[in-house]
């Protein structure tokens, strides 16, 4: 079934056209004939041109805010880096070094007292103190890194909140209803939407966004598949090497 007003396809049971709002008379079953191929192509081209022009207007409007968009993305990257878990290996190494340095000294003090420490020469003191000092230094540096990371995280979050408010206010002042959500208002994203329309991969802005999201999903899946395949190749190579050297031990 097709709408008698605009020629759009109508699902069975619908009482109004979802495109033009024209009421559908189910009793009389009056519907328009299916549009010809030529007129359909003309409508698609017209819709594509109109959408591309609207995207161009949005790019012109949002381009002055490009530095703010870039800074917002940088803040997001910093926040992601700062929220990642710190590796505990350096702290463990520092604790081990401290143990190697301080435990013998504590043991000597507990048994012989200060006089026992006084019996050690310079070389013995260095043997005990150097690992302890290195371990302490590693732990102190790690603590400083954690403090700086938290400070940087808080600064980035505060700055991102201010940028989000500024960009939201600018987005709301577009003048007319913006055809893309705020998350797609970055001029760089709008340029990708415009390219998708100009390439004929979509006829409307919504379709272009869906195409880009689909492309991004396929890229992630391909990357994941490549990483999985690479891990499998490395595992197979390692297993083969292990088997070879295991068999070689039989003849040694």
Image (cartoon, rainbow, N blue to C red):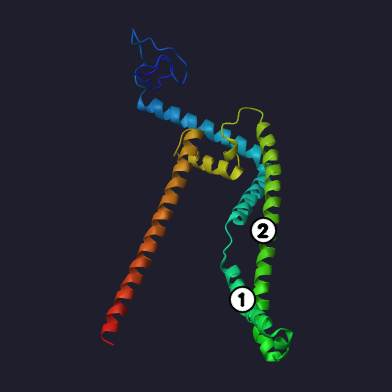
Relative placement, left or right, of 99 versus 235 is: right
Question: 242 or 214, which lies in front?
Answer: 242
Q: Which residue is painted at 47% across and 47% down in the image? A: 216
Relative placement, left or right, of 161 versus 4 is: right
> Residue 185's x, y, as percent?
60, 39
Question: Reading the chain from its start, which is encountered first: label 1 or label 2?
Answer: 1
Mark 1: secondary structure: helix
Relative placement, left or right, of 160 versus 27 is: right
Residue 224 figure quarter? bottom left
Instruction: Look at the image and tell me in which quarter the C terminus lies.
Output: bottom left
Instruction: Look at the image and tell me in which quarter the N terminus lies.
Output: top left
Q: Which residue is painted at 40% across and 22% down in the image? A: 8
Residue 105 figure quarter? bottom right
* Residue 244 drawn above or below residue 196: below
Q: Which residue is painted at 61% across and 36% down in the image? A: 58
Q: Is residue 199 visible?
A: no
> Residue 27's x, y, as percent?
34, 7
Q: Tell me the distance, in whole angstroms, between the alpha carbons under discs 1 and 2.
A: 27 Å
> Which residue lies under the disc numbered 1?
99
Question: 247 or 95, which lies in front?
Answer: 95
Q: Which residue is painted at 40% across and 12% down in the image? A: 24
Question: 73 or 66, which lies in front?
Answer: 73
Circle 1 packing at 10 Å, graded few (<14), some (14-19), many (20+), is some
> Which residue lies under the disc numbered 2?
149
Residue 121 figure quarter? bottom right
Relative placement, left or right, of 51 versus 67 is: left
């Amino acid at each position: 079934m097709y709408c008698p007003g605009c020629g759009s396809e109508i699902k069975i049971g619908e009482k109004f056209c979802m495109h033009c709002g024209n009421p559908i008379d189910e009793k009389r079953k009056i519907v328009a004939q299916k549009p010809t191929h030529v007129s359909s192509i003309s409508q698609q081209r017209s819709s594509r041109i109109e959408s591309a022009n609207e995207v161009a207007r949005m790019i012109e409007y949002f381009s002055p805010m490009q530095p703010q968009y870039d800074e917002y993305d940088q803040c997001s990257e910093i926040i992601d880096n700062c929220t990642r878990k710190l590796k505990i290996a350096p702290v463990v190494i520092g604790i081990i070094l401290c143990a190697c340095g301080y435990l013998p000294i504590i043991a000597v003090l507990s048994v012989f007292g200060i006089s026992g420490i006084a019996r050690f020469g310079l070389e013995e003191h260095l043997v005990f103190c150097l690992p302890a000092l290195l371990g302490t230094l590693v732990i102190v540096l790690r603590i400083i890194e954690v403090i700086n990371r938290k400070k940087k995280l808080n600064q980035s979050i505060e700055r991102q909140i201010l940028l989000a408010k500024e960009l939201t206010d600018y987005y709301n002042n577009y003048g007319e209803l913006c055809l893309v959500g705020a998350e797609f208002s970055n001029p760089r994203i709008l340029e990708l939407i415009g390219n998708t329309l100009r390439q004929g991969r979509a006829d409307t802005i919504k379709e272009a966004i869906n195409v880009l999201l689909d492309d991004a999903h396929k890229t992630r899946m391909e990357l994941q598949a490549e990483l999985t395949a690479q891990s499998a190749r490395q595992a197979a190579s390692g297993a083969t090497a292990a088997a070879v050297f295991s068999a070689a031990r039989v003849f040694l």
